[in-house]
Amino acid sequence: MPESISRREFIRTGGAGLLLGATGAFALEARPSERKSRNIKKAIMYATIGYRGSVLEQLRAVRAAGFEGVEPMSHMNRDEVLKALDETGLKAASVCCATHWDKRLSDPDEEVRRQGLEGLKHALKDAKVYGASSVLLVPGKVIKGRVTYRDCFQRSVAEIRKAVPVAEELGVKIAVENVWNDFITEPQQAVEFLDAIDSKYVGWHFDIGNCIKFSPAETWIPVIGKRILKLHIKEYSQFKRFNVRLLEGDDHWPAIMHALDEIGYEGWGISEQPDTQTRTEVGLKDLSERMGRIFAT
């Protein structure tokens, strides 16, 4: 960067985005007076907590690190989760359906799909008990020679529609997540999927790291728009994939935060970083601080 261009001017004109892939933390250096205030609350996906101990001990460590919420898995011991939430003051940001990979809603076997639907309904009931407003759902998986994109689309739409009455009764929404399942690899496909279900109780759980393999996260956000119910905060690197810390990969965080501002996103930002980064109190604190820097970009 030429010495005649100040860092502030470089960032203001968008040049920082060009350097972000190589030096992710650079564009996030901001003086306290320049930090933005966003209503995005920090949470962590329970399955990614590497800290050893009981649910209560884990959530105590999460709270001490500066998190405000947690995303429990469905089918956990409800009493144990409720006790831990109550004693730590953490909120349930979301509930992740624990059955969606093994009992896929897109499976060719009708019985498997039935079990998957029951798993989703159970997750919705867990969310109601914990006070979470949505359930994270992976809708299915395209499998070469067995499940086509059309199969996955039609079957999962049909099964999710069956769960909508339960979601409406409980007041808990279903949030479909983009993952590496060879299904919905473009933002417009996400819109088409939600349009096919056609329910205000079904929206999107946007995973920032998962989509970067296909196209930048900031290009998905304006397309899906206000149908984004929750965020998974995850870093991705073309060299290390997900085995990289926040701010050290290929996510264009300033552009992502700007895109979220444009759609008026408020709510939870839930970390799904590898559990190897959260095995200690120091690791949890580091993750929390990195998320804070991102949200203040």
Image (tube, rainbow, N blue to C red):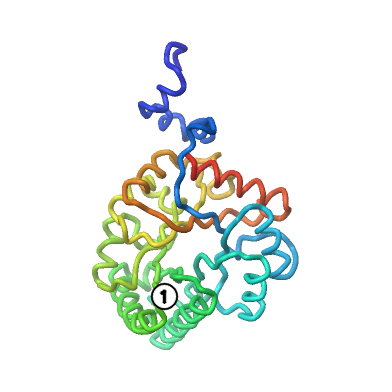
Q: Which residue is mark 1?
A: 172
Badge 1: residue crowd in 10 Å (few <14, some 14–19, many ≥20): many
Residue under the image location 45 percent in, 18 percent down:
6
Residue under the image location 34 percent in, 71 percent down:
202
| Location of residue 19 by image quarter | top left
Q: Position of residue 37 (x, y in %)?
A: 46, 44
Question: How many labels sit on residues?
Answer: 1
Residue under the image location 37 percent in, 42 percent down:
258
Q: Is residue 274 above or below residue 59?
A: above
| Side (left or right) of 47 relative to 187 | right
| Location of residue 182 by image quarter | bottom left
Q: Position of residue 281 (x, y in %)?
A: 73, 52
Q: Is residue 189 above or below residue 286?
A: below
| Side (left or right) of 77 relative to 207 | right
Secondary structure category for the residue under label 1: loop
Q: Is residue 217 above or below residue 55?
A: above
Q: Amino acid at mark 1?
A: Val
Q: Position of residue 205 (x, y in %)?
A: 41, 62
Residue under the image location 37 percent in, 70 percent down:
145
